[in-house]
Amino acid sequence: MLSVVLPAYNEEKMLAKAAGTISSVLEEAAIPYELVFVNDGSRDGTWAEIEKAAAGNPHIAGIHFSRNFGKEAAIFAGLANASGDCCAVMDCDLQHPPEALVEMYRLWEQGYEVIEGVKRSRGRESVMHRASAGLFYRMISKAVGIDMSRASDFKLMDRKAVDALLALPEKNAFFRALSSWIGYKTASVEFDVQEREAGESKWSTWSLVKYAVTNIVAFSSVPMQLVTVAGVLVFIFAMIMGVQTLAKFFMGHAVEGFTTVILLILIIGSVIMISLGIIGYYISKIYEEVKGRPRYLISKRISAERRTDEGEK
Ligand code: UDP
Ligand code: MG
């Protein structure tokens, strides 16, 4: 059976349509399936829509978070509650075409264990967005060691790969890159990002910046190495200045200059402060991991077979 995990945050307008389209595509292809909708603390009627969809289709399951925990948390909750022999993850705004899902499933049947959805085109995006996404993916690709520039969260994974992902202890999990990090026999399927028909993208510029910084820090220690490089550069500069100053001193005239001194103090001060900031960010992330709080809290669920609503801690 194929489990499809669909994170949903304020998607009341798209939910019924997504559930209908995906299930009819899978039924047509004769693929046994379940759809696991994860309501990530939506503030609109998304949960009611999930309940309605589940009432009309026994293959639909739902998970209701106690609040918004973010898309990564929703993906992991869905995977943890999926019972299929393979699990797919896709957006529930139909920007990931369900036809590609069938293609992925066929590859899984051929023995592939991780099937990555790769963006053929990125859809409509602003120039700024494209440029900053480009920079972010270049850094992440370096950190992971594979090209991530066209990566997406649209994937299908074998049970083995899903269990490997779920066994990772980190709370700051970056699904898009971890699915490559775990290895396994990998294939990819190209797809075109569709236009969103209703509702709106949840990403503001600020949340994208946060997403980028969090995931770079989660995957790479390059920023901390940059701190060392900055330190070495300032040190070399200081040595050259020192030699020059001493030479002048022995030639009989001491160097004077209030401006130079202030300027140097400011430059070195800011290098130190930026470095402390970078290190502090890593420490705060370590602190978060050490606290070991759960990634998400579930308040209600509807299971595909056993239709019961239950509250849990
Ligand atoms: N999403 C989520 N939690 C969030 C933000 C988004 O579960 O905090 C879901 C959203 O419902 C959608 C998917 O993640 O199914 C992708 O979100 P969106 O369409 O806003 O992103 P975009 O396609 O613009 O990158
Ligand atoms: Mg979308």
Image (cartoon, rainbow, N blue to C red):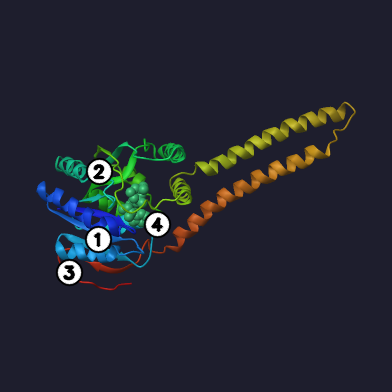
Mark 2 Cα-neighbour bin, 10 Å: few <14, some 14–19, many ≥20 = many
Residue 284 position within the rendered picture, expressed as x and y whole percent measured from the top left: 52, 56
In the image shown, does 112 or 97 lie closer to the viewer?
97
Residue 49 is left or right of residue 292, and the answer is left
- The mark found on residue 81 in the picture is 1
- Please name the residue that numbered disc 2 is placed on: 114
Q: Amino acid under label 1?
A: Asn
Mark 4 Cα-neighbour bin, 10 Å: few <14, some 14–19, many ≥20 = some
Query: Outermost residue toward the top?
Result: 251
* Mark closer to the observer (3, 1): 3
Residue 27 position within the rendered picture, expressed as x and y whole percent measured from the top left: 11, 51
Q: Earlier in the sequence, mark 2 or mark 1?
A: 1
* Mark closer to the observer (4, 1): 1
Residue 74 position within the rendered picture, expressed as x and y whole percent measured from the top left: 32, 58
169 in relation to 194, above or below: below
Label pair 3/4, CB-CB below 8 angstroms: no
- Please name the residue that numbered disc 4 is placed on: 171
Mark 3 Cα-neighbour bin, 10 Å: few <14, some 14–19, many ≥20 = some
Q: Amino acid under label 4?
A: Lys
> In 3D space, how far apart are the residues under numbered discs 3 and 2 (Cα atoms)?
31 Å
Q: Earlier in the sequence, mark 4 or mark 1?
A: 1
Q: Earlier in the sequence, mark 4 or mark 2?
A: 2
* Mark closer to the observer (3, 2): 3
Q: Earlier in the sequence, mark 3 or mark 2?
A: 2
- Please name the residue that numbered disc 3 is placed on: 307
